[in-house]
Amino acid sequence: MSEAKLAGNGAELVRERALAARIQGGLERVYRLDRVADVGDFLRRAQDGARESLLLREDDDGALEVGLELPSLGGPVPDANLDTVCQIIEGVSHFVYVVERARTGRSTTQLELELQAEVDKWVVLAASMQTLDVEASAGLRARLYEQVSFAHSKESELGERYRVANDAAHRFVRRLERDYLGRARFRELRSELRFFFEVGQQDKLRLGRAA
C-alpha cells in the first residue's frame, strides 16, 4: 500500500484527526491488529453536506492508494452530532479493514465493509460507556440500528446494501447482548468480535442471521 497522503490536511481537521486516531487505536486493540498505517495521514475534509467516503485506487504495480474524506465535527466531541461521529467511526472502520485485508492479501466487498462498519459503530460507542450491560447496550443498539433513516431508497443497490448491513449488525449485536453481556462473559464477547472481523461476507451474514 502506497502512503499517498492527500492534500487538504489543514488545521480544520485537527479534532477529527484526533478522534479518528483514537478510534483506530481502539479497533486495533479489540481485533489485535498491528499498526500498518496511521489513518491521520490519509484524511481530508469532505465537502459541506457530503458524507464520509473511502477512496481507493490500485496502481498498475499493485500498490493501493487510500484516501478518507470525513465530515467536520460540529461541536465538542461529547456534544457532536451522533450521525457525524458514526460517520467518522465508519470511515475509520473501512480504513482499518481495507488496510488489514491488503496486508494479508485478502480481498473484500463493499457489503463486507459495511457489515464490519455497522458492528464497529457499536464496538466503539459501547466501549465509551461508563457501564456496559444489556440495558445500556439495548439503548445504544436502538439508536444505531432502529432509529435510523436511509439516504437511498430500498430499491437501489446502495439502499439494499445499507439495509442488509444494518439488519445483520443489529441481529448480531442483539445476540452479543443475550449470549455474552447478559452473562458478563466479556472474554468470550471479545473473541466473538474478533471472529466476526476475520471472516468474510458470507460468514458475517450467517452470524447476523443466526441471531
Image (cartoon, rainbow, N blue to C red):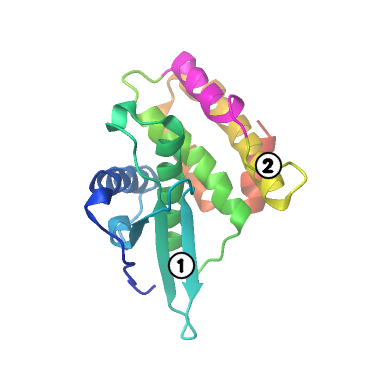
Rendered image quadrant of residue 209? top right
Rendered image quadrant of residue 26? top left
For the C terminus, which image quadrant? top right
23 sits to left or right of 140: left
In the rendered structure, which segment of residues is drawn in magenta?
Answer: 133-149
Report the Cα–Cα distance between label 1 and label 2. Answer: 25 Å
Inspect the image, locate mark 1, and give the three-letter code of the amino acid beneath it.
Ala
Of residues 177 and 22, the one drawn nearer to the viewer in this rendering: 22
| Residue depicted at 50% across the width and 48% down the height | 197
Of residues 156 and 172, the one drawn nearer to the viewer in this rendering: 156
Residue 38 in percent (x, y) is at 29, 58
Identify the residue under disc 2.
164
Residue 165 in percent (x, y) is at 63, 42
Dominant secondary structure (helix, strand or loop) of the stretch shown in magenta: helix
Examine the rendered structure and indicate whether residue 88 appears above or below residue 66.
above
Tell us which disc is closer to us: 1 or 2: 2
Examine the rendered structure and indicate whether residue 47 appears above or below residue 206.
below
39 sits to left or right of 11: right
| Residue depicted at 26% across the width and 49% down the height | 12
Outermost bottom residue:
61
Q: Is residue 99 visible?
A: yes
Inspect the image, locate mark 2, and give the three-letter code of the amino acid beneath it.
Val
